[in-house]
Image (tube, rainbow, N blue to C red):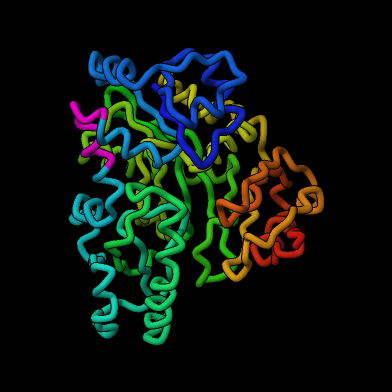
Amino acid sequence: MFILEKPYVSDLLKNTLAELGKPVLENETACKELRDTAVCLTPGHEFTAEYNNDRSRPVYSNSENAIDWIDNNLDSGGLPAKIRLFKDKGAFRDLVRDMYPDFFYRTVKFEELDTVRVEDLPIPCVIKPSVGFFSLGVHMVESAAGWKQAVEAIKNEVEQIKTMYPAKVLELDNFIIEECIEGEEFAVDAYFGPEGNPVIINILGHLFASSEDVSDRCYITSTDIITKHHANFLQLLQEIGSRAKLKNFPIHIEIRSDKQGNLGVIEVNPMRFAGWCVTDLAHYAYGINPYKYFMEGLKPDWKKISGCCDGKVYAMIIGDIDSTVDRKRIKSVDYERFKANFTKPLELRKINYKEHPVFAFIFAEVDADNMEELKKMLHADFTPYLNF
């Protein structure tokens, strides 16, 4: 069963819906995105009835904007509670507290941020909305002065952020302060099957421009990354799934792994794989259709896949817009010039920059021994691609 919502529905997802013939909720987004396809939409009351007849059926949404509808209509089972467990970062930290007994975290109300004593915090640390998305409102704190700057920045951002996403996706009443988790950062698309066993669909390495960078600008995947981390990540997923009693449940989990192989969980995003249909990168890299694999309980044959794309790296780069830019003044974007940064672009997705602080997503393939064009993107100023 599928629930489509803003901000983005990819062509791969649309084509998969037509192929699978699974129920798709009839709502404004689905009507708009699927109007020229063969997909038959299911009215809300019928969708709810089908779910209630078999609550074990897999449910997937491309966006957490669907959480509010799920809360109000699919509340006869345990689905809303499981979603909330992961959306609320404080609740998730409570779930895994004994796995990380020395890990510092603290929740604080927005209006009480000014009362927090910086000397009580582990510096460096991270502050972010307890319920958040897309690195919005996330700030790295490297010093006592940095804490004050972060609080001021959050105050300035809150009202603007509220206009971008529904409250269920991004709640700004409560924030969580956490100590920094050391190591390389990864994002994992996975699902738990009908017996509760986890299946990894893709592993993405998160590239950063510096230690203070918290943006989502660039992610990469390769068979080297899969081979190195699959076993450890699968074991971690097994433990989390067991504690939360997950079955037929998709997640997008962010993890850090240090040089000793110790794993720290940053956060878990429920009901979906990588947001904005970025999970489609697995299709370009490995021929894996994430939506079909979840719905049909398929498992990637990683040994077979590794022989097809060794030596290649597949990347997703976000064409983000600097917060100092007045997006209302943008008249157009030079997409071809942006695309020319990549030797082998795979797909360019144009995004409505009037509604979002992003003008594009692009998938690209590079040789593993030549990562320079990706590294350049980490430090690049994208403003020259904007026409005012």
Residue 149, placed above or below residue 32: below
- Residue at the spot x=30%, y=68% of the render? 177
For residue 149, say whether it is visible. Answer: yes
- Near-viewer residue (387 or 265): 387
- Residue at the spot x=44%, y=68% of the render? 157
Horizontal side, residue 172 vs residue 244: left or right:
right
Location of residue 155 in the rendering, given as x and y in whole percent from the top left corner: 39, 73
Give yes or no for residue 80 being in the magenta stretch: yes
- Residue at the spot x=40%, y=29% of the render? 60
Horizontal side, residue 78 vs residue 342: left or right:
left
Locate the C terminus by quadrant. bottom right
The part of the chain drawn in magenta is 73-83
Give yes or no for residue 227 being in the magenta stretch: no
Horizontal side, residue 361 vs residue 196: left or right:
right
Location of residue 381 in the rendering, given as x and y in whole percent from the top left corner: 70, 66
Location of residue 41 in the rendering, given as x and y in whole percent from the top left corner: 45, 17
Residue 30, placed above or below residue 139: above
Residue 77 position by quadrant: top left
Location of residue 312 in the rendering, given as x and y in whole percent from the top left corner: 69, 42
Residue 237, placed above or below residue 373: above
